[in-house]
Image: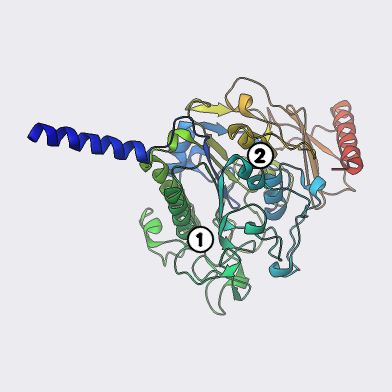
Amino acid sequence: MKAWLVRTGWLIVIACWVAAAPAATSPPNVVLILIDNVGYGDLGCYGNLAVKTPHLDALATQGVRCLDFYIPSSSCMPSRGALLTGRHPLRTGLNEQVWRIDEMEQRVLPLRESLLPSYLKPGGYLTACFGKWNLGFAPGHRPTERGFDEFFGHASGNMHEYTHVYNGRNDLFRGIEPVIVEGHSTDLFADAACEFIRRNARKPFFVYLPFNAVHFPNPVNFAPGDPVIWQAPAEAFSAYGCTPDEPDPRRRYLAVLTALDAGIGRVLAQLEKLRLAENTLVIVLSDNGAFMLKNRGLEVASNAPLRDGGTTTYEGGIRVPCIIRWPGRIAAGTVCREPLVSLDLLPLILDAASRPLPADRVLDGRNPLAALAGKAASPHESLFFEYGKFSALRTGRYKLVRANPDAAFELYDLETDIAERKNLASEKPDVVARLSAARDRWLKAIASAKN
């Protein structure tokens, strides 16, 4: 009798394991994590010795750490539109940070543009967005109206981490309805992603997790008289031996990064707990470089060793941390030094999901898998960057950049001068002419394109 009970018990355990585990041939899940304004030098795995980001540092050892990864436009809104469409902001028409129009009335990314979840849903994927939307919240433009099955997050480009206020009003939504939920936004969005993954463990899913952190504290989100300071849970401060009333903004910023890392760690742990990690493509990147805006007293982030920061097209504005883990396709501990761009992530994800590329429009991204795996060079001859008055172009080792249309182009050799200190334009006029001509041809092609 005891032997029979033991055998029966093991059969039950095995049956439960089989029921919980995904089918070996199921399409891979995708978790796309977008962190906000995190600089190239902000994470431990990118050389920051002061910060504690153990989960992201571990993730970097489990997949590929990209050292030459870019976004095409150095501000939140156009960067997000490019990521989700695979199309350059100049092609979609969204290459500005729209803030003078109320979020509830914004129609910033044209409805003719298809977003990543819309390409995945015909393949059976369940899709969800948890966090910062910042792509317009007028009717027809909200996440659940643009391909996402679920949305929990905020409409605007930033909000108070605890009150969830943007510019004097609550900015937290579930679907299209405003909601009041207590908690630190990083925790709320990470926990929502974990719950979605738990509910859909046996189906292919796409989780887009654009955190509000670490966006700099915006005075419009604070009540009159409240200090405008970096915010994080107490346990993040305790990691640095301090408390939530710590006065030093640099230590406060480190706590924000550590809290963000902890939230990402919980999502990664959920994948492990449900035995989904081996069949999940995980991508973490920043939407632009850290802002280096002057005279606010909050310039404590790091784009080291790069020049300048967000809203510019110097390297600090457009080169960002990016970590990708895809077991079985990208070897652990890989480092990629090929120039790639966030536009490439849509083709990568569609390839992972065995979904076709759209035939009715031009994509500016190219599948980067071979380059990420260390088996090929970048699929791009050149990468192009535009934001405001700034322009830039990278071809191989050379970078052409200018701060406004009336200025002369500057030329840098990024292989020997990653900090863009020595302008080589007068020494290499032939390179300037060649790259400038390539940029002119690209702009002409964008202007003449019909889709």
Q: Is label 2 in a helix, a strand or a loop?
A: helix
Residue type indicated by callout 1: Pro
* Figure quadrant of the N terminus: top left
- Percent x, y of residue 193: 48, 52
Residue receiving disc 1: 249
Residue receiving disc 2: 346
Residue type indicated by callout 2: Leu
Q: Is label 1 in a helix, a strand or a loop?
A: helix
- Percent x, y of residue 77: 70, 55
Question: Residue at 25% of width from left, 38% of height from top?
Answer: 13
Question: Residue at 47% of width from left, 54% of height from top?
Answer: 190
- Percent x, y of residue 23: 44, 34
The answer to which of 171 and 73 lies nearer the viewer is: 171
Question: Residue at 87% of width from left, 41% of height from top?
Answer: 446
Side (left or right) of 74 relative to 60: right
Real-space CA distance between mark 2 and mark 1, rounded to the nearest whole angstrom: 36 Å
Q: What colour scheme has been applied to the protein in the rendered image?
A: rainbow
